[in-house]
Image (cartoon, coloured by chain):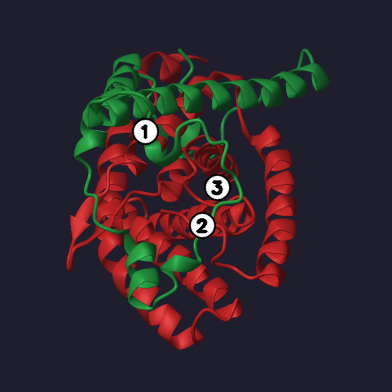
Chain colours: A green, B red
Amino acid sequence: MKETRLTARKGKWLALLVVTLLAAGLLSPWASSHPDGLERVAEDYGFLNQAESVHELAPMPDYEVAGIPWTALRVGLAGIIGAIVMLAVLWAVMRVITGRRRGRDDGTDHGRGTGASSESAQ
Amino acid sequence: MHIPDGFLDAKTWITTSVIGAAAVAYSLQKTKLAVDSKQVPKVALIGSFIFAAQMLNFPIAGATSGHFLGGTLASILFGPWIGSIVMTAVLIIQAFVFQDGGITVLGANILCTAFIGSFTGYGIYKAGMKLLTGRGRSVITFAAAWFSIVAASAGVALLLAWSGTFEPGTALKAMVGWHMLIGLGEGLITTLVAGYLIERNIPLAKEVTLP
């Protein structure tokens, strides 16, 4: 038997959703603006100026929604939108994947999860 | 920040794009076998959490910052195949919607962050759990997450060195040095969230009494 499992308590997952939205919407504008590890190394070794962008059509470059005068709102809104887009995209991708599988072995056991993820039968 | 366009030369980004695409295709096949339809909302939520947490750069020494990556968290929760797909999705959204991480180097970022990160973390976690027979789970989780960051940064360093940006030794020392510090943040967040979501598998009373 597996020793651990993912919690089946809905409240915990709901709390994680709230934490996610708070982090993306409220905390993100206050994140450190110092260069991160890779940027620091690039700066120290003089190749930061090699950075370029082949993709100029990003709707929210640098995690900011354009046209809003308040920085906190620009960043926070981009964070919220990003978190929701992320949720929707992964949900859709995983739906497509599991849907296909369900079509293939129809009527059989859909299999339990793997790793720490097997859920208790409720 | 992920690797931006321009940091890797043509041979390096073309090679990593090909290998990265193959890795993602293979991982998608594996994910198809591993994912349970009941897990879909949870997988999506973890991806969303990882995206949000990656925005929160925390200060480390010398006017430098670091941020969470999340490969270890996703793979100890759902296994490394689903974990690598979650990380790949995060990197794709970041590159195309937020211009964070380049397009030509997307394969390189996917290989380092999504694959090296997820599999190193998962491997250490599984080995640790087996070795210590399930004791000290939070210490193992912290170590797995820390090593995954160090390994991912070593991957980036070697790709930079292969591009001729700087010497392999210098690259490794610089990248790994900073990420040994950044990895502490990774360890802390991974341990907290995994500890919150993973519980001991104690059979329910009604299951025990079933014939």
Of helix, strand and loop, which one carries label 3?
helix
- What amino acid is labelled 1 in the image? Glu
Q: Earlier in the sequence, mark 3 or mark 2?
A: 2
Of helix, strand and loop, which one carries label 1?
loop
Identify the disc placed on residue B6: none
* B54 over A65 or under it: above or below: below
Task: Name the chain letter of the residue that bears numbered label 3.
Answer: B
Per the image, the residue denoted by label 1 is A64
Out of B116 and A8, give the one closest to the viewer: B116
The quarter holding residue A103 reads top right
Q: Is residue B7 something that shows in the picture?
A: yes
Q: Are marks 3 and 2 on the same chain?
A: yes
- What amino acid is labelled 3 in the image? Pro
How far across and down, in percent of the image, does residue B81 sit?
A: 60, 44
Residue in view at x 49 percent, y 20 percent: B41
Out of A16 and B198, give the one closest to the viewer: A16
Task: Name the chain letter of the residue that bears numbered label 1.
Answer: A
Per the image, the residue denoted by label 2 is B4
Mark 3 or 1: the one toward you: 1
- What amino acid is labelled 2 in the image? Pro
How far across and down, in percent of the image, does residue A2 sit?
A: 47, 39
Q: Are marks 3 and 2 in contact (CB under 8 Å)?
A: no
Residue in view at x 50 percent, y 52 percent: B118
Per the image, the residue denoted by label 3 is B80
Of helix, strand and loop, which one carries label 2?
loop
Q: CA separation, marks 3 and 1? A: 31 Å
| A8 with respect to A75 (left or right) | right
Instruction: For label 2, count other residues whose C-alpha is less than 10 Å away and answer few (under 14), some (14-19) or many (20+).
Output: many
Q: Are marks 3 and 1 in contact (CB under 8 Å)?
A: no
Q: Are marks 1 and 2 on the same chain?
A: no
The quarter holding residue B140 reads bottom left
Q: CA separation, marks 3 and 2? A: 25 Å
